[in-house]
Amino acid sequence: TTSQAGAAQADTTPRANVESSRRTAIVTAVEAVSPAVVSINATSRQRITPRTPWDAFFVPQGAERIVQGYGTGIIARPDGVIITNQHVVGGAGGVVVTLADGRDFPGTVLGEDPVTDIAVVKIDATDLPVARVGRSTDLMTGEWVVALGNPFAYMLGNSEPTVTVGVVSAIGRNILPSGDQAGLFLDMIQTHAATNPANSGGPLVNAPGEV
């Protein structure tokens, strides 16, 4: 009847409105960038330094151990060029890159710059998804941004990146080195989006889905 049809429409309209409101600019931005986010596993050899006389008795001189470090990267070109932080792959003897679809590739470090903490890694792959790159000059303090990374490394069962949301807290920040830091971090974007150590190298994305 007409009254029943009207009641059914009234029941579905609120749900349709809720479903529509769930698809925000942030959801769209994550969908656009996630396929281009990769995990990076870098292995290096580290000399074991005895900390006590007891350790020196049992640890052979010159003994080394394999150390694994984890980070994130972003695919910059469809032929397998990846951008990450230099401290993620610096001194690595081997690099393995895991794509968002779960495939693993050996990686080669093409170049690295400790001063700006940027490195370029290459994998032998084609037709890869690429993230769009925006301009930091277009950023506005207070606008929403999304941080994507792999902070739990290989402890998770899938390769989907972890997403956190924040705002641009400030732009043009200069951070001077302290302690054992070697680089000068100039004209940085400050955000309060939550990050963890293995987020290093991952993208910060604006609402239009640009890195």
Image (tube, grey):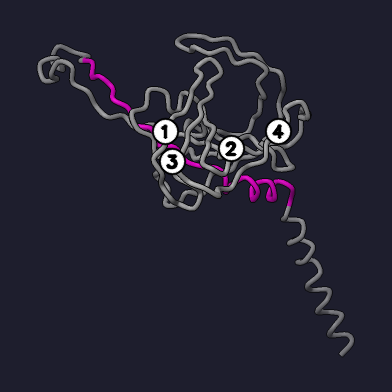
Q: Identify the residue at the far right of this view.
A: 2
Q: Mark 2 sits on what residue?
A: 76
Residue 51 to residue 26: above or below: above
Residue that appears at 12% across and 19% down: 60
Would you name the residue on which mark 3 appears? 97
In this rendering, position of residue 91 left or right of residue 121: left
Task: Tell which circle, 3 or 1, labels the residue nearer the N-terminal end.
Answer: 3
Q: Which residues are magenta?
A: 24-49
Three-letter residue code for mark 4:
Val
Give the percent coordinates (x, y) of residue 201: 53, 31
| Whole-percent x, y for residue 41 in the image | 40, 36
Q: Mark 2 is on which residue type?
A: Ala
Magenta-colored stretch includes residue 138: no
Left or right of 114 on screen, residue 176: right
Residues under labels 3 and 4: Cα distance? 29 Å
- Callout 4: few (<14), some (14-19), or many (20+) C-alpha neighbours within 10 Å? some
Specify whether 211 is left or right of 196. Answer: right
Nearest-to-viewer mark from 3 and 1: 1
Q: Give the residue type that dot 3 points to.
A: Val
Task: Residue 39: say if magenta.
Answer: yes
Residue position for label 1: 108
Of residues 35 and 6, the one drawn nearer to the viewer in this rendering: 35
Describe the element under mark 4 as helix, strand or loop.
strand
Pick whichever of labels 2 and 1 is earlier in the sequence: 2
